[in-house]
Amino acid sequence: QVQLVESGGGLAQAGGSLRLSCAASGTWSYIGAMRWYRQVPGKERELVAGITRSGTTDYAGFVEDRFTVSRDNERNAIYLQMMRLKPEDTAVYYCAASILRQGIAREYWGQGTQVTVSS
């Protein structure tokens, strides 16, 4: 069984910062890329940032150098440092991990954490 648990969401003012964390637990053969997504009601879930096991990162265009994704392979964790937050960053943020388990590779998801940015 695999579980991803996010934490660190909450309320921030525009221009402020938040740091999201996500830790994976369970058993697997290999854990590869990890990613952050976000979703607002009525819209599709969108990729925010991703990081490979070796540390290569990629970001969505709307990040504009405001967010930094990192990971700790020892802890099977991914982080998202968000700075200069905007009201439009308000969303539920989900972490995801590509995991090989019992011969099957697929994406596992966390339950999401709410981020609300007030103007």
Image: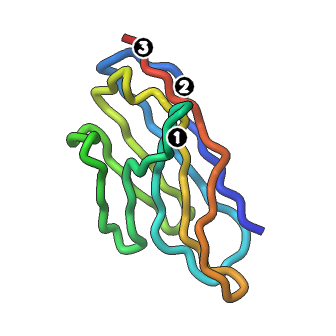
Q: Which residue is mark 1?
A: 93
Farthest front residue in view = 42
Labels 2 and 3: the sequence-earlier one: 2
For the C terminus, the quadrant is top left
The residue sitting at 50% across, 46% down in the picture is: 45
The Cα–Cα distance between marks 3 and 1, rounded to whole angstroms, is: 16 Å
Q: Quadrant of residue 66?
A: top left
The Cα–Cα distance between marks 2 and 3, rounded to whole angstroms, is: 11 Å
The Cα–Cα distance between marks 2 and 1, rounded to whole angstroms, is: 11 Å
Residue 118 tag number: 3
Residue 4 image position (x, y, % from top left): 65, 55
Residue 22 tag number: none
Q: Quadrant of residue 97?
A: bottom right
Side (left or right) of 80 relative to 56: right
The residue sitting at 49% across, 68% down in the picture is: 73
The residue sitting at 48% across, 63% down in the picture is: 34
For the N terminus, the quadrant is bottom right
The residue sitting at 39% across, 69% down in the picture is: 52
Q: Amino acid at mark 3?
A: Ser
- What secondary structure is marked by label 3? strand
Q: Is the C-beta separation of discs 2 and 3 under 8 Å?
A: no
